[in-house]
Amino acid sequence: MYLDFAWRYFKAKKSANAINIIAWVTTSIIAFATCCQILVLSVFNGFEGLVTSLYSSFYTDLKITPANGKTLFLDAAKIKEIQNQIYIGQLSCIAEEKALLQNEGSQTVIQLKGVDSNFTKVNDIASKIIKGNYNIGNVENPMMVVGTGIQDATGIALNPAFGPEELTVILPKTNNQSNDPLSSLSEGTITPSGSFSIQQDFDNSYAITNIDFVKQQMDMQHNEFSAIEIKLKNSAEIESSQVALQQLLGKNFIVLTRYQQNANLYSTMKMEKWAIYALLTLILLIAAFNMISALTMLVLEKKQDISILQSMGSSRLQIKKIFLSEGLLLGLIGSVIGISLATIICLLQLKFKLIKIQGGSFLIDYFPVKLMPTDFLLVGLTALTVTFIASWFPANKASKQVIELK
């Protein structure tokens, strides 16, 4: 009944044309705000999915790190026990440290990552090789793959026509007790075999070689590692697997998920997403003021109707519900229009890549979008909540009107 009254009032011609104008302006603002909110959330979802896919080429589902210090100790039996857990797919032992890479007159600081033969089974690094091939060699003949940023910074050619290049890598010794600074460093030669391109942060920092070479140069013990990287059988069960593995290992180890390994990036993306969403919600507040004006004028125009309804036995609550329904109707129409328009734009963007990213320096040249049902629910509830609050004041005024029949 209340929506029927609200719909009749919405369609009916008002004595003051300004009421119609304000009502449609209010609906338009709600449509604009909800459309913008869906678009912004969808674009952020798209970028988040893109970044997650890029980082998943390097960051694994889970990573075991030491609770204290830079290295952890795990014997072969313990590693085998971890491998035998039902949720573990593959694991790789890591020895990682900052190093100085030199190539003739060029040098740069890198993050040298020593990995075992299972490393390509826990991530997709091998598929990101763009020049040369993935070959990390062995302790007698160490080789490495470098990020494209490191390749450019040190002038690594990777040209088979010129023969293999020999680079110098300088690493700190972890267990050195000498007071001589020079004796705390090790120097070795290594041959580049290929270069990879994932994302600028990785390309400018990381080089990958075999774990035995790194451990030899750093004087690490046979059961000493920097981390253990793990790929799960089912990545959807990452939180439960993290808890189970943490209980197995105890307090001397920390088990990190892919998101926790790069918490700053993901938290910043989330913060930016919801900050912009909050700013766009302010547009709905502007619509709320327009709605208060439109409904207040409608209450004044419908004084006689309200008096007739009261004389027929309608309670104050029923009168209030009629005008609350009028406000919610405006919010519902605006939300449906805005969300529908945003959905059409997103679907067109997904199919035709209409809106491009300017500059041409990013990995893709268009804005990625990803539609999520929770965003539609959130935006719709936000719009209806704001319109309900805005409708409350004129509806309350209408319910308190004194009967005036002439």
Image (tube, grey):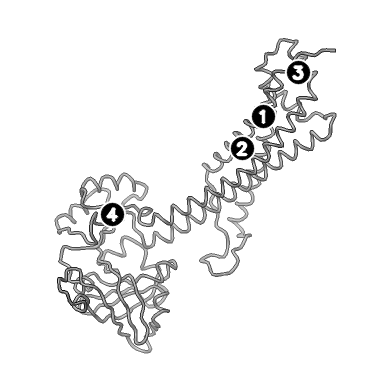
Q: Which residue is mark 3?
A: 306
Q: Residues within 10 Å of mark 4 (few under 14, many from 20)?
A: some
Q: Which residue is mark 4?
A: 89
User: Which residue type carries mark 1?
Assistant: Ser
Measured as percent of width and height from the top left, residue 275 is found at: 54, 49
Q: Earlier in the sequence, mark 2 or mark 1?
A: 2
Q: CA distance from mark 3 to mark 1?
A: 16 Å
Please, is residue 89 above or below residue 193 in the view?
above
Left or right: 100 as drawn, with respect to 56: left
> Which image quarter: residue 393?
top right
> Which image quarter: residue 79?
bottom left
Q: CA distance from mark 2 to mark 3?
A: 27 Å
Local secondary structure at mark 2: helix
Res. 1 mark: none
User: Which residue type carries mark 2?
Assistant: Ala
User: Which residue type carries mark 4?
Assistant: Gly
Please, is residue 34 above or below residue 349 in the view?
above
Q: Residues within 10 Å of mark 1 (few under 14, many from 20)?
A: many
Q: Which residue is mark 1?
A: 391
Local secondary structure at mark 4: strand
Q: Earlier in the sequence, mark 4 or mark 3?
A: 4
Measured as percent of width and height from the top left, residue 66 is found at: 24, 56
Res. 383 mark: 2
Give the label, 4 or 2, closer to the camera.
2
Measured as percent of width and height from the top left, residue 168 is found at: 29, 82
Local secondary structure at mark 1: helix
- Residue sitting at 52 percent across and 47 percent down? 274
